[in-house]
Amino acid sequence: MPVPVHAQRIDSIPPWKTAVRTIAIDERLATDARLRVGDRVVLAAEPGGASGDTVRIAAIVRRRADPSEVARGEYRIRTHLGQLEELIGYGDRVDRYAVATGGGVTADSALRRINALAFGFHAYPSREIAVETSKTFLVVSRFHRAIGMITIVASATFLLCIMLLKVDERRRDVAAMRLMGISRATVIRTVLLESSFVALLGSVFGVALGFVVSAFVNAHYQAVFRTPLRFAIITPATVMYSVLLSLVLGIGAGALAARRLARTPPLALFGR
């Protein structure tokens, strides 16, 4: 449970003259309070409390990449269990604890035995707790997926229009090729080759831009929230999907525009 803790540096007592208990603090508290390993502080349930406990900082713990902790600005201190009981006066009670199974015991059988011991508490598997705490992020993920699908459809429509306009601008070139005796199939293959090259070049540029933007987003928000969590991730599967989609849409748009242009009579392409 969250405990209000007041930390005060004590520099007048040399660390070798008395044996004190140790604690671990997170790097956010160490940065803001300018504390280091070996510093001696006083832990109290209230700021300025007379019954504080003098302890020594033994370690500075880095925060985990947990999305549920990103927006929390609280500080964290890890103490020994007996020390925590004395600090908060909670007695021999706990709100929750974790149990790891071993020795061939399955999690389901351990759950049944624990829940049958007494009333007043209930055991849950870790996967259910993870699902319950991740519902918010699941909704956000679905929202992002919907935005992505809308963006893909809009981009495909825009790409098709651009490709039709670009191919239509070359109607005189296509008409000259047709009058020279070049077949429709050759014209279509030429346009397809060009559209494939443009789609591949655009894919490479898009992937490079994605990596740059992802690095900028991670650097900015990691500094704002002071967390190692990566807010933007580009996976190989994402790269393959984007490149494949770009090639399919580019080649498809090029083929549609080329067939439309190749079916038009050469003299009509000249405007006659």
Image: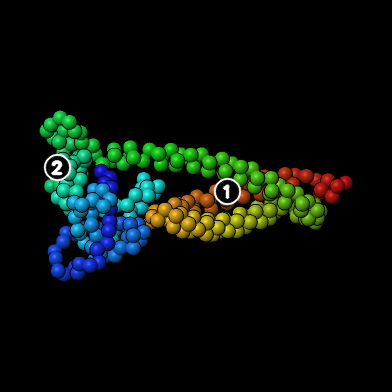
Give the left or right position of residue 171, taking residue 221 as reference: right
The residue positioned 47% from the left and 51% from the top of the image is: 238
**Residue to which mark 1 is pinned:** 248
Residue 214 shows in this picture: no
The residue positioned 20% from the left and 52% from the top of the image is: 50
* Mark 2, secondary structure of its residue: loop
Displayed quadrant of residue 104: top left
The three-letter code of the residue at mark 2 reads Gly
Which label lies toward us, 2 or 1?
Answer: 2
Place of residue 73 in the rendered image (x, y in percent of width and height, measured from the top left): 37, 49
Q: Nearer the viewer, residue 266 or 104?
A: 104
How many residues crowd mark 2 within 10 Å: few (<14), some (14–19), many (20+)?
few
* Mark 1, secondary structure of its residue: helix
> Which disc is residue 91 wearing?
2
Give the left or right position of residue 42, taking residue 259 as reference: left
Residue 223 shows in this picture: yes
Give the vertical position of 85 relative to 58 (above or below). above
The residue positioned 24% from the left and 63% from the top of the image is: 10
How many residues crowd mark 1 within 10 Å: few (<14), some (14–19), many (20+)?
some
Q: Nearer the viewer, residue 237 or 227?
A: 227
As drawn, the residue found furthest toward the right would be 272
